[in-house]
Amino acid sequence: MLIDTHCHLDFPAFEPDRGQVIRRAQEAGVQYFINIGATLESSAASCVLAAQYPQIYASVGVHPHDADTFDLVAEKKLKQLAAEKKVVAIGETGLDYYRNLSSKENQKQAFLKQIALAKELNLPVVLHCRQAEEDTLQILKNALPLAAVVHCFSADENFLQECLGCGFLISYTCNITYKKAAVLREMVSLTPLDRLMLETDAPYLSPEGFRGKRNEPMQVKLLADEVSRIKGISLQELGQQTTRNAKSFFKIP
């Protein structure tokens, strides 16, 4: 069995056929889904889905793209959402200096406040980091001890080793299947199996052969096939360990 540890099933892309998407994923061996909040609205929608579907759990957070809107009212609302029964993490939160849709200072402040909330509630953090490794590490190291996963890992070996040294988990997406993703596949090989999780980031980042189409959680099976190939282990062993990792990290029974 597999767990898609990062997807966005509340997004409009899944509105027409969400139930079928979930069914297809289950038929592919996906046992649970962690639906990730990126705004207050999507975090609330994530909680609704978690209440509706027994196999869905929610994470609530404000993405760095929306950090300019993260005021005291938003912070209070996020804390209320985080108290919902099936919320298992805070995030995705972090820093994104690639698109810079919010100011760097506001991104940092929103990140710090969400880390503080996670620590207050004893919840792990789902991290987003894009071209902001130095500032991300500085903030995270000051917050240790902290349970966190680096979502959609796309950086270099130095950042990987720094994150592993902090005790964080590393999550890979279907972009490791891309023809030009040799460096990412090397990062997969360097990531200890007991620190690795799988995700689709659906509807984004469809695997090779499906690029340009909507990604779905069922594709975590294709991702698992590729990771097991890189690791030189059976799909069964990979599935058992990554599921164990995810259940422990998100405290899923």
Image: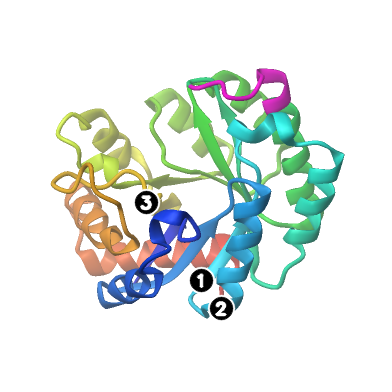
Q: What residue type is labelled 2?
A: Gln
Left or right, 29 with reference to 46: left
Give the CA distance from mark 1 to mark 3: 16 Å
Q: Could you say which disc has been placed on residue 232 in the image?
A: none
Q: Measure how far apart labels 1 and 2 are at the Cα level.
A: 8 Å
Q: Which colour scheme is used?
A: rainbow
Hey, which quadrant is residue 132 in on the image? top right
Q: Are marks 1 and 2 in contact (CB under 8 Å)?
A: yes
| Contact (Cβ within 8 Å) of mark 2 with mark 3 | no
Label 1 Cα crowd, 10 Å radius (few <14 / some 14-19 / many 20+): many
For badge 1, the amino acid type reads Ile
CA distance separating discs 2 and 3: 20 Å
Mark 1 touches mark 3? (CB < 8 Å): no
Give the mark nearest the N terminus, 1 or 3. Answer: 1
Locate residue 154, reporting x and y percent.
38, 32
Q: Is residue 86 left or right of residue 217?
A: right
Towards the viewer: 65 or 228: 65
Queried whether the magenta region covers residue 249, the answer comes back as no
N-terminal-most mark, 2 or 3: 2
Q: Where is residue 141 in the image (x, y as percent from the top left)?
A: 67, 31
Q: Nearer the viewer, residue 27 or 18?
A: 18
Q: What stretch is highlighted in magenta?
A: 99-107
Q: Which residue is drawn at 56% across and 60% down?
A: 249
Image spot of residue 85 (x, y percent) = 70, 73
Q: Which residue is drawn at 40% across and 27% down?
A: 155
Marking on residue 56? 1
Q: What residue type is labelled 3?
A: Pro
Comparing marks 1 and 2, which lies closer to the viewer? 2
Q: Quadrant of the C terminus?
A: bottom right
> On the rendered structure, is 3 left or right of 111?
left
Quarter-of-image position of residue 25: bottom left
